[in-house]
Amino acid sequence: MINKGRVFSGARPTGRQHLGNYLGAVQNYVALQNDYDCIYSIVDLHALTTLETTLDLKQNTLEMALDWLAAGIDPERSIIFIQSHVPEVAELHTILSMVTPLGKLTELPTFKDKIREQPNNINYGLVGYPVLMTADIVLYKANVVPVGVDQAPHLEFAREIVRSFNFRYGTDVLIEPEMKVTKIPKVLGIDGQKKMSKSLNNHIELAATPEETQKRVMMMVTDPARKLRSDPGDPDVCNVYTMHEIFSKLEEVEMINRECRIAGIGCVDCKKIFAKNLNDHLAPFRERRAKFSQKPQEVLDILYEGGKRARKIAEGTMREVRNAVGFP
Ligand code: TRP
């Protein structure tokens, strides 16, 4: 392995992952393991900023971990752990919060979105969300953070916090992380309109059975102008075609592009081909997932073990941080 440094990324425990999560994050996490020393965290503390109840938190954490492992995040090569298992992150968050200007936090677009989304739960943690995220990254001295472009303001802000900490305490113990923007194909939901998301119920779950997957695929909205089987379609505005481009072989993609435009192939057949290709692609994932889900204790052990390894690194950083701050 050519070691290019340390990657850290995190995702909130949203339970079973869907195609959007897979193409937008998980697949990339898996690939990065070839070049970097990777740490992936299920950020349950961050989840508390938006959750109304924690009844599903454990289950959602476990389901997400199962999907990550089945997708190929390899606990032998990488650390996969639960954020709250390393309490040092909370201490670092507190220390960093004192070098973070409040005015900038409340100006962040992500914070403003949250105020709109949950006007009855504008909690203190929401304001500090990017500070906790910074603590995550710098606690493990990560130099590369793969995230979607929506997280760019957070990453830029993390860099500012690091500079501000290092300047204030005349140190260089914290590392300024680089953002690595994940090139995400635009993954729309089966409605063909909105970004794929569980809350909109327009998603296709990775762990679904082939039959369920086929059913969801058959519900996908295609070119809205194509009403009849005999109407020619436009692949450029068809979400199923976009998916073919990702999951189907080149010849098939070319055939569909050509035949759709002359009504040589109908949407039903086009979707059947996609469903088959998607199911083929996910078959090894599902097989691994089934194996892991028969041994939930093993999955928990992997997460605990990952937490222990993460904590070792965190303890080292915290010793340096406390020294730099000058605690007696
Ligand atoms: N803020 C990220 C999100 O909402 C999740 C996250 C938390 C994260 N800590 C992180 C991402 C550290 C990268 C690095 O998607």
Image: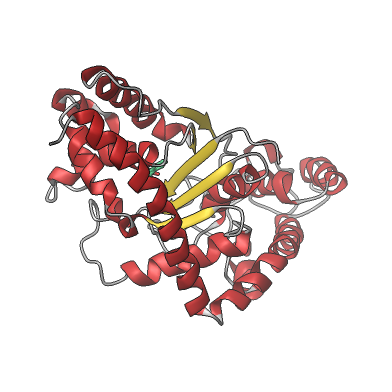
Q: Residue at x 77, y 51 (%)?
A: 248
Residue 110 vs 264, above or below: the answer is: above
Q: Horizontal placement of 150 versus 105: left or right?
A: right
Residue 179 pos. (x, y %): 48, 29
Residue lying furthest bottom in this view?
A: 294
Quick one: which residue is furthest to the right in this view? 251
Position in image of residue 71 (x %, y %): 62, 59
Q: Is residue 223 above or below residue 271?
A: above
Residue 279 shows in the view: yes
Is 238 on the left or on the right of 134, as rendered? right
| Residue situated in front as seen by the camera: 314 or 90 | 314
Assign the N terminus to one quadrant of the image. top right
Question: Ligand 1 is found in which quarter of the picture?
Answer: top left
Foreground: 282 or 306? 306
> Viewer-proximal residue, 274 or 177?
177
Q: Residue at x 35, y 40 (%)?
A: 317
Quadrant of image for the C terminus: top left
Front residue (pair 185, 3): 3
Q: In the figure, residue 101 lies in which quadrant?
A: top left
Q: Is residue 24 left or right of residue 250?
A: left
Tell me if residue 91 comes above or below residue 309 in the rendering.
above
Q: Position of residue 325 (x, y in %)?
A: 20, 30
